[in-house]
Amino acid sequence: MSAAAPTSSPIGAPAGSRAPFEVITAAPRDGSTQARAGRLTLPHGVVETPQFMPVGTNATVKALDPDDLERAGASIVLANTYHLYLRPGHERIQRLGGLHRFMAWDRPLLTDSGGFQVVSLDQLRSIDDDGVTFKSHLDGSAHRLTPEASIEIQAALGADVAVAFDHPVFPSSPRAVVADATARTERWAERSLEAHARSERARELGQSLFGVIQGGLDPELRAESTQTIAALPFDGLNIGGLAGDETPIQRADALRVVVPLLADDPRPRYLMGLGSPIDLLDAVDLGVDLFDSVLPARVARTGQVWIPGGRLNLRNAAFLDDPNPIEEGCPCPACRRFSRAYLAHLFRARELLGYRLATCHNLTFTLDFMARIRAAIQAGRFPDVRQELRVRAGRIRAGEAAGEPA
Ligand SMILES: [Zn+2]
């Protein structure tokens, strides 16, 4: 795949976007990195970027309570529109005071559009230009999501940030499939904006709306989608259709198309679905501000914990006699009080505490890694410490790390 950046000039944000985002440290002019630091100001608090969002699929980051999340350093959490729409239902959550109150999380929340889950249902859905008809993975009941419905559900949930309904496809999809989904995403982007502008509840909440760039791995489609979505008055720009089956080089090539086109655009750039430390570092280096992924929590529940330079598999018998903490000096509840031996025992006995402690550790590690990245950028030292950060990140790529199912 060739990665020649298009020659079109960068674009700024269109009039009308509220842009609750401020760049605090811009990328240096010498081109040594595109990494930048910023601040996203939302109704429930400020999010320093680059930032990682833990995923609370069912209005909970599996095994953790809000105090665990705060201690791990989470400043914003993602919740899944598709899952909450099906169960317990967005109207019920609204009646109970909205998602923040429901899950007792008083810091910022972002909901995704539901598009990814719905489109991933594969055998269970059909897509037309108006929306997607799908069958619930829970009970097989029939449902329909449109841009308008997604926006209404997200307004009812009441997150600080909602996302426009999009049509994602696997990065490796044939060009015609990517082109079709990208064009549909652009039409749905405008409908999402109109529905959001009409929503009284979204206005009362001060809810932001982010739009989604698609375009797969094709530089022309990617550039065209970037320009089209960036021309709309969204508050932030998601880079979709990556963190799938592409290689790290293909992902970098796609970012080298998108980011230069957004060089003068003051809005946050959010790459959906990326979660291994080395992938986060590389994407920050290429100019991305925000990330989310289930990965650190999912692998923790399989007994895999991240440490500087790599990972430990707590199911390995060698740890049954290891009196050391997972990581010396880590402030998480696992490392402060417990040994690797105890964790190894908990995993073998399938004790619930093991899942919680390992998840606390991996999220603490990931969020601390992002804090180190931010500190380096703010000090103007990111290019100097990039190699040090690479060593700390280890070489675990998402594909190798995913391993076992949730
Ligand atoms: Zn720890």
Image (cartoon, helix red, strand yellow):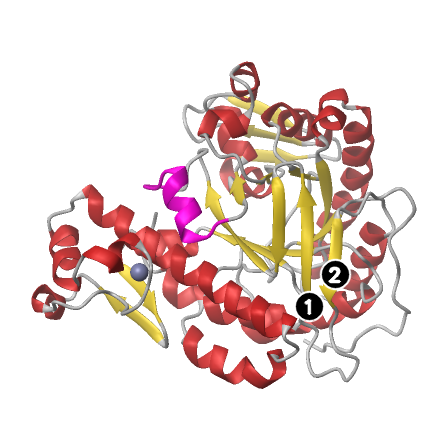
Question: Residue 306 vs residue 379: left or right?
Answer: left
* Residue at screen point 85% across, 46% down: 232
Q: Which residue is mark 2?
A: 23
Residue extending farthest to the left is 321
The disc at residue 280 is none
Look at the numbered disc 2 and give the secondary structure of its residue. Answer: strand
**Is mark 1 in CB contact (under 8 Å) with mark 2?**
yes
For residue 44, what is the image quadrant? top right
Q: Is residue 63 magenta?
A: yes
Residue 233: x and y in percent read 84, 44
Residue 144, above or below 215 = above
Q: How many angstroms separate mark 1 from mark 2 (CA)?
A: 7 Å
Q: Is residue 71 magenta?
A: yes
Question: Residue 15 vs residue 360: left or right?
Answer: right
Residue 190: x and y in percent read 82, 38
Q: Which residue is mark 1?
A: 36
Q: How many marks?
A: 2
Which quadrant of the figure contains the N terminus? bottom right
Disc 2 packing (10 Å; few <14; some 14–19; many ≥20): some
Tell me where the magenta segment starts and ends, as one range: 62-74
Q: Is mark 2 within 8 Å of ligand 1?
A: no
Disc 1 packing (10 Å; few <14; some 14–19; many ≥20): many
Where ligand 1 lies, by image quadrant?
bottom left
The tag earlier along the polypeptide, 1 or 2, is 2
Residue extending farthest to the top is 95
Tag 2: amino acid: Val
